[in-house]
């Protein structure tokens, strides 16, 4: 059984992060590249969004009593039918980027961060699918 209260709390947190990210992203790529403050805020919010998405996915996974897996990617892809393959693919991409940002890899792509921060429609779709699931 899915812990509905925990998932609702996580969804509220995710919604807060999305609102804050939207408030910082009404700019062009060139403006983004020249504003280190907005870059850092966006990077951190994407990391937090990725963490909450994973927490929600783990709750759903446990609640659905799916086959035991120990790694993130197989766990997320086990939920392709729940959230949609394209949404899960975007979550995996965000996790990959999160890992680059968290471990201070010098080679992360500023354009990719901007792209992910600018188009969060998949996160909103993930939230809607989660809400339907826990009704």
Image (cartoon, rainbow, N blue to C red):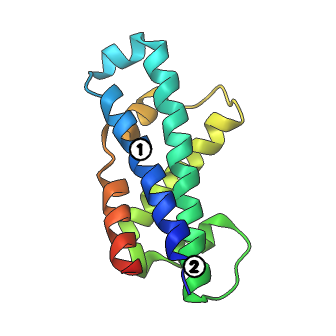
Residue bearing the label numbered 2: 61
Per the rendering, the mark at residue 43 is none
Is the N terminus in the top left, top right, bottom left or bottom right quadrant?
bottom right
Q: Between residue 130 and residue 85, name the one nearer to us.
A: 130
Q: Position of residue 15 (x, y in %)?
A: 39, 50
Q: Position of residue 77 (x, y in %)?
A: 52, 73
Above or below: residue 1 compared with residue 31? below
Q: Residue at x 49, y 77 (%)?
A: 79
- Does 129 sit left or right of 36 as displayed? left
- Does 12 sit left or right of 27 as displayed? right
Query: How many residues crowd mark 1 within 10 Å: few (<14), some (14–19), many (20+)?
Result: few
- Measure how far apart labels 1 and 2 are at the Cα level: 23 Å
Above or below: residue 106 compared with residue 47? above
**Label 1 with label 2: CB-CB less than 8 Å:** no
Q: Position of residue 89 (x, y in %)?
A: 45, 62
Q: Earlier in the sequence, mark 1 or mark 2?
A: 1
Q: Residue at x 38, y 43 (%)?
A: 18
**What SS does tag 2 mark?**
helix
Q: Position of residue 74 (x, y in %)?
A: 61, 73
Q: Between residue 30 and residue 14, name the one nearer to us.
A: 14
Kindly tell me whether residue 84 is visible in this rendering. Answer: no
Query: How many residues crowd mark 2 within 10 Å: few (<14), some (14–19), many (20+)?
Result: many
**What SS does tag 1 mark?**
helix
Give the image quarter of residue 97. Answer: top right
Spot the residue most to the top: 34
Residue bearing the label numbered 1: 16
Give the image quarter of residue 47. Answer: top right
Q: Residue at x 62, y 35 (%)?
A: 101
Q: Between residue 98 and residue 55, name the one nearer to us.
A: 55
Give the foreground label among 1 and 2. 1
- Does 131 sit left or right of 4 as displayed? left
Kindly tell me whether residue 126 is visible in this rendering. Answer: yes
């Amino acid at each position: 059984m899915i812990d509905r209260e925990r998932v609702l709390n996580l969804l509220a947190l995710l919604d807060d992060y999305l609102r804050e990210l939207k408030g910082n992203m009404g700019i062009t790529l060139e403006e983004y590249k020249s504003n280190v403050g907005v870059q850092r805020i966006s990077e951190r919010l994407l990391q937090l969004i990725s963490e909450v998405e994973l927490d929600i996915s783990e709750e759903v996974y446990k609640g659905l009593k799916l086959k035991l897996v120990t790694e993130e990617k197989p766990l997320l892809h086990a939920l392709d039918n729940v959230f949609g393959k394209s949404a899960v693919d975007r979550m995996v991409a965000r996790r990959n980027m999160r890992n680059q940002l968290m471990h201070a890899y010098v080679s992360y792509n500023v354009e990719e961060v901007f792209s992910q921060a600018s188009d969060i429609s998949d996160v909103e779709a993930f939230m809607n699918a989660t809400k339907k699931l826990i009704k």
